[in-house]
Amino acid sequence: MKEYLLLFYNQTGKAAYITTPADMLEDMPRWQQWIGNIAMQGKLVSSQPIEYDGTLVTQKGITAGPFVQNEIVLTGYLLCKAEDIEEVKEWSRSCPILKYEHGSVEIRPVMPFEV
């Protein structure tokens, strides 16, 4: 099996995620069920939401974040194992982030790193 990193994006508000506390409360059972389905198959490696604040480090220095591109910000991740990317695409089609107009899932295959 290969590992895949799923990155969850959504629109940003003023120094906060656009989703309201009520949306987050409503969404939590959906996320638990969605991630739980992957975990029950033995294919979940890890998953976490991430805090809004962040730090961007470049050659030119350090900037308070987060990194926002076109009002879209990274909100969380999931690392999983799957037989192929088609399986991961199928899971992603039912991801709770897609309920939001600007919600999206980016799927990135993890490249093995030999040391």
Image (cartoon, rainbow, N blue to C red):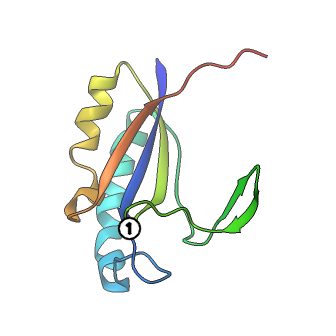
Residue at left offset 35%, top offset 63%: 10
Q: Position of residue 95 (x, y in %)?
A: 28, 51
Q: Quadrant of residue 33?
A: bottom left
Q: Quadrant of residue 112?
A: top right
Query: Residue at position x 64%, y 66% from top?
Result: 54
Q: Is residue 112 toward the left or the right of residue 82 in the image?
A: right
Is residue 52 depicted above or below 105 in this figure? Answer: below
Q: Nearer the viewer, residue 32 or 76?
A: 76
Q: Is residue 94 left or right of residue 1?
A: left
**Where the C terminus falls, by quadrant?**
top right
Up the image or down, 64 lies above or below 74; here it is below
Q: How many marks?
A: 1
Residue situated in front as seen by the camera: 53 or 112: 53
Q: Is residue 35 left or right of residue 59?
A: left
Give coordinates of residue 92: x percent, y percent: 28, 42
In terms of image quadrants, where is residue 93?
top left
Query: Looking at the picture, how far across and down is residue 83, in whole percent?
Result: 37, 18
Horizontally, is 42 left or right of 64 in the view? left
Residue at (30% x, 52% y) in the render: 104
Q: What residue would you read off at disc 1?
A: 71
Q: Residues within 10 Å of mark 1 (few under 14, many from 20)?
A: few
Direction front: furthest residue:
60
Amino acid on which the number 1 mark rests in the picture: Glu
Mark 1 residue element? loop
Relative to 102, say whether 108 is above or below. above
